[in-house]
Image (cartoon, grey):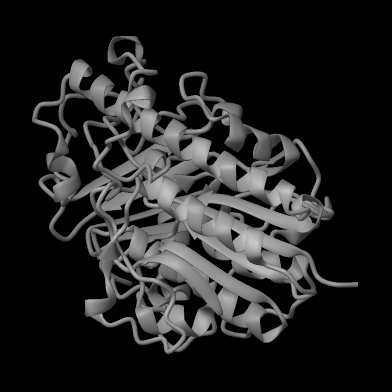
Amino acid sequence: MSRPNMLFLFTDDQRFDAVRALGNPEVVTPNMDRLVARGTAFTHATVQGSTVPAVCQPSRAMLMTGRTLYHAPRDCGDFVTLPELLQAHGYVTFGTGKWHNSPRSYARSFTDGAGIFYGGMSNHLEVSIHDFDPTGEYPAESRYVGKSFSSELFSDAAIDFLQRHDGDAPFFAYVSYTAPHDPRMAPREYAEMYDPGKVAVPENFCPVHPFDNGEMVIRDEMLAPFPRTPEIVQEHIAAYWAMITHLDAHIGRVLEALEETGHAEDTIIVFAGDNGLAVGQHGLMGKQNMYEHSVRVPLVMCGPRIAAGERSDALCYLLDIFPTLCDLVDVPAPESVEGRSLAPVIRGQAQSTYDSLFFAYMHKQRAIREERFKLIEYFGEAERVTQLFDLVADPWETANLANAPGMDAEVARLRSELHAWQRRVSDPMTGALED
């Protein structure tokens, strides 16, 4: 029996709650909703953090190598990548869209491709791309500007691959979008779907973040003036929703092509985002922080032997996708992979994989969360602050309990677990918070 195909739909800067079927009545996402209905949604999936302001770069390296933040070189190094492994087990591997790591790691990962973007962000109507180069060289002079909006461009490449793929070999198709990353410039018909005046202002809105988190004037934070106003935030959210709805429409085209080519029933589909985004929450606009809106991402898996319409609140990372897919298609994961397979959760054999999750941002922020409590520590260039949130009672992270009566023991316990995580993942700032 041949192994199932895989279609990986990866979005850029899409927050965990930016899908209607996952509890957001404002955003229109019928095709993402179809995937949620057809599969298992992990509602507490996260990115572990970043060593640079461009959070998406290490996020993608962790995804592709299955390694933790400080063990995953941003160019993937010499570690076996997910498509490289699948290729060794007989898969045709196709990649289109954003590859924010290195041409070298792309070249050894994929046997086919189109519309390959090696940058981090661009004007969505002027994406600088490469055609697939069998030599793996990808010289600068071979770049050219795509002729359509990024979401359409990459979807067209994926559809073309699905239509021309034949033979008995299974495929791994990696479709990596640059939407809804700014600039938020959805086509007019989508932008007009959202009236900023009718967009809800987040419950954790504030004009300015209450203290210096170490990244107050980074590029992402300069996208809106200080202090933030409800009206400005509503405008940004409306534009963000429009980008996602436009992206959703093109994801729908890819799913339709999968059905038309007869592969809908024998393909595992993964839908995920690389990191979250504040878009006005906590007085912030970007993702260079440890709040839930920035570390949590959508993650849905559907296909053969994956239960439909299921939700799991298991704590997990994007880097767990690598060993999970290996388990689902019976391919041994390399010893280099540090992620934990979610297959036991998908099969109903386990409820969770982690008791706690560790997060890091450069040398400025560290966090740890369990099912209920989350501790964030700021240091280095940031103002020295400790935050403690009860995520069950306060999912918007508005009430800092760090100095509340009776919480000293909770803070101490979580700090101890945070320090243990730092040692476990080789955090270069291990010890910096223990003085």
For image coordinates 17% across by 42% down, the residue present is 221
Tell me if residue 304 can be seen: yes
Along the line of sight, the residue nearer the viewer: 189 or 39: 189
Where residue 72 sits: x, y (%)?
42, 76
Where residue 196 sits: x, y (%)?
29, 16
* Residue with the most extreme top position: 198
Q: Quadrant of residue 172?
A: bottom right
Where residue 260 sits: x, y (%)?
72, 48
The total of numbered circles placed on residues is 0
Left or right of 172: which side holds 233? left
Left or right of 285: which side holds 318? right
For image coordinates 44% across by 59% down, the residue present is 48
Q: Quadrant of residue 56?
A: bottom left
Quadrant of the image containing the N terminus: bottom right
Q: Quadrant of residue 22?
A: top right
Quadrant of the image containing the C terminus: bottom left
Along the line of sight, the residue nearer the viewer: 337 or 240: 240
Q: Is residue 123 above or below residue 204?
A: below
Tell me if residue 295 can be seen: no
Q: Is residue 60 above or below residue 31?
A: below
Along the line of sight, the residue nearer the viewer: 228 or 116: 116
For image coordinates 36% across by 79% down, the residue present is 103
For image coordinates 44% across by 44% down, the residue present is 374
Where residue 36 sits: x, y (%)?
66, 37
Q: Is residue 281 above or below residue 388?
A: above
